[in-house]
Amino acid sequence: LISREGFIRCYEKYFHADDEKLTKIIRLLDPNNNGMIDYISFSQMLTPCKLPNFTLKCKEIGPLAMATPSSDEIVLMKAMRERLHTLAKDAVHCGTKLLIDAEHAKYQPAIDNLVLELQQKYNARDRTERPFIFNTYQCYLKDSAERIAMDLRRSERFSFHFAAKLVRGAYMVHERERAKKNNLPSPIQDAAENTHRCYDEVIELLLRHRARHGPGLEIMIATHNKESIEKAVNLMSELDIGPSDESVHFAQLYGMSDNLTFTLGNHGYNAFKYLPYGEVQEVVPYLVRRAQENGDMLGNVGAEVSLLQDELRKRYQFE
């Protein structure tokens, strides 16, 4: 929350606005006339389709104006929105989850906006006891923890179930090169340890929220990192969240880290295998990005081979 005066100062710093227009905006954001402006309510106004009219008032060409879609792009976005609603309706009808993947940082605000719209409708608490629509958060981004905390507050404010797939991130090289090319600060964590810390802290935040508020929130812990999985499992035990609790899911790529997936499954946890599907020229680059994202997974290949050899010996001896 910020004061009316603070909001007006910030608005006039970046936008051209006559008194009448600004008064209408203030009335919309402060309907009870209590002198405070809610940032979440303001951000609700900044949908991609409304941005062109909004950024026309910018005093300078900045990040918001540069991110504003053209009229042709808005047509495409509306078509994409219709398709997403079709997918969401079918997912709800079939009783399955729909996980919207993350993309390059420059595209993510538009994706987040669309997912928020879907979550408000299909995860609404007066409509369902469990969420169907998941957003994906890449914890190698410096702002990921802040975004998750904000979206969690949004879910409370607008009465829908929060649902997230948590990954580390897959576009590190691209993001750093783009930031350098455009003379922008890198959005990527400065060290791998920071990404690991962020990932584990976000899991703890969400698990503790689940323990305090009961069922409704759901998370997909999508990782091949053994340490992160062990921390999550131990925290679930500490918070008295059972292995089969529908609030928590684990996932690894099909054909990778089977020792983690099978161990989780054998102990009653909700364990999934993630199967990329598509043409070879599309799937191979995707898998390469996953390998870059999970460098620690590649370091565990030797351990996996050793486990497989031990299992084969046991079975051979048994026969």
Image (spheres, rainbow, N blue to C red):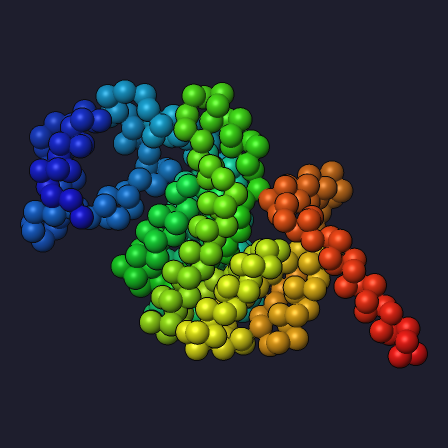
Residue at 63%, 58% (x, y): give it: 252
Q: Residue at x 46, y 51 (%)?
A: 197
Query: How many numbered discs sit on the rendered protein?
Result: 0
Q: Nearer the viewer, residue 149 or 230?
A: 230
Image coords of residue 159 (percent x, y): 31, 63
Q: Based on the displayed image, in which of its 4 quarters is residue 250 positioned?
A: bottom right
What x and y, as percent, mark residue 123? Answer: 41, 63
Where does the image place residue 122, in percent across and percent down from the top left? 42, 61
Front-lying residue, 75 or 251: 251
Q: Is residue 180 above or below residue 152?
A: above
**Residue for point 53% across, 48% down:** 168
Say above or below: 207 vs 13.
Answer: below
- From what the image shows, is residue 178 above or below residue 3? above
Residue 132 shows in the view: no
In the image, is 308 to the left or to the right of 277?
right
Q: Residue at x 53, y 26 (%)?
A: 177
Image quadrant where one finds the C terminus: bottom right
In the image, taking residue 37 as reference, residue 136 lies left or right, namely: right
228 or 148, nearer to the observer = 228
Counting from the top left corner in percent of width and height, residue 161 is at: 39, 64
Instruction: Answer with the quarter of the image where residue 182 lies.
Output: top left
Q: Is residue 156 visible?
A: yes
